[in-house]
Amino acid sequence: MRTASRQEQAEQLLEAAFKEVRPQTDAPYLIIGTVPVFFANFLVDLKEQKIFDAMRRFDLVDKLYGNCEFTFKGLERRAQRLDAVAQLRRTGLVRFSQQMVPGQRIDGAPAFFPIHIDIQLREFTIKVPKLYAVAGLSGPFLLGMLLNATSQVKGLYPDSMIPQATVARGSIQPGLHSFPTVVAYDFGDIDSIIRPLCDQVHQGFGQDSSPMFDREGMWMEKDF
């Protein structure tokens, strides 16, 4: 019962942290987060230099060693582009958010490539274990994701008939689109952890699954 209660509390922490993000444009915002199930208040000592340095390296957009600062929520690192923000909170919760830049506009609605969600989610799950190792935090962890759309958004995919061309396939309506939380014990098998979330992204645009995985469920590097 205590384990179930802790997991419920962790889910509530993630949900609350996700809803704090306020989009600055009509482009959709991707929010990814994870938190230890057995968290404790003020568990992470944010004053440790090694943790501060690790947060300066935690960026999925610029891929640069950047500035980090103390805030009321914890440590925060802002990228130079896409309104991208990474946070490490005292509870061990890590949240990353960024604007998904529209590739173009179709019938007045922003359109973007959903595979960028797959890529950012995988980058997040590669980097967050390193941050947790520095902070001395162990699993299990909850991993969650939310897509905040303030307007209708269309999905862009490669055109199967015309090389290097794209076509809009499906759309999502305005709202907070939450994905189920996933339990990750050590982030060891990243592909199996993130694939259900990636599949759901593309199913939201009318596709059967994510194009980033092969038939065996292994991640495929692609150039789009």
Image (tube, rainbow, N blue to C red):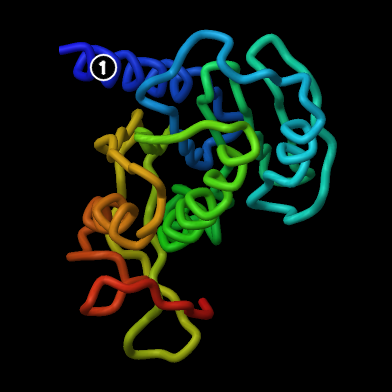
- Identify the residue under disc 1: 8
Residue closest to the eye, 43 or 20: 43
* Residue at 53% from the left image edge and 36% from the top image edge: 26
Quadrant occupied by the N terminus: top left
Q: Image quadrant of residue 215? A: bottom left
- Image location of residue 187, percent across then percent down: 41, 50
For the point 35% across and 29% down, the residue is 176
Please determine whether, in this image, residue 183 is positioned above or below residue 192.
above
Amino acid type assigned to the residue bearing label 1 in the image: Glu
Q: Which residue is drawn at 43% across and 63% down?
A: 115
> At 40% from the left edge and 90% from the top edge, which residue is drawn?
162
Residue 205: x and y in percent read 27, 56
Q: In this view, does 180 lie to the left or right of 135?
A: left
Q: Is residue 6 visible?
A: yes
Residue 72: give x, y in percent of width and height. Answer: 69, 9
Compared across the picture, whether 207 is left or right of 158 comes to left
Q: In which quarter of the image is residue 77?
A: top right
- Label 1 sits on a secondary structure element that is helix
Crowdedness of circle 1 by 10 Å Cα count: few (<14), some, many (20+)? few
Q: Where is residue 35 in the image (x, y as percent from the top left)?
A: 44, 28
Q: Taking 46 as reference, is 209 above or below it?
A: below
- Of the pair 25 and 115, the residue shown nearer to us: 115
* Numbered circles on residues, count: 1
Q: Which of 58 and 160 is in front in this view?
A: 58
Is residue 162 shown above or below 213?
below
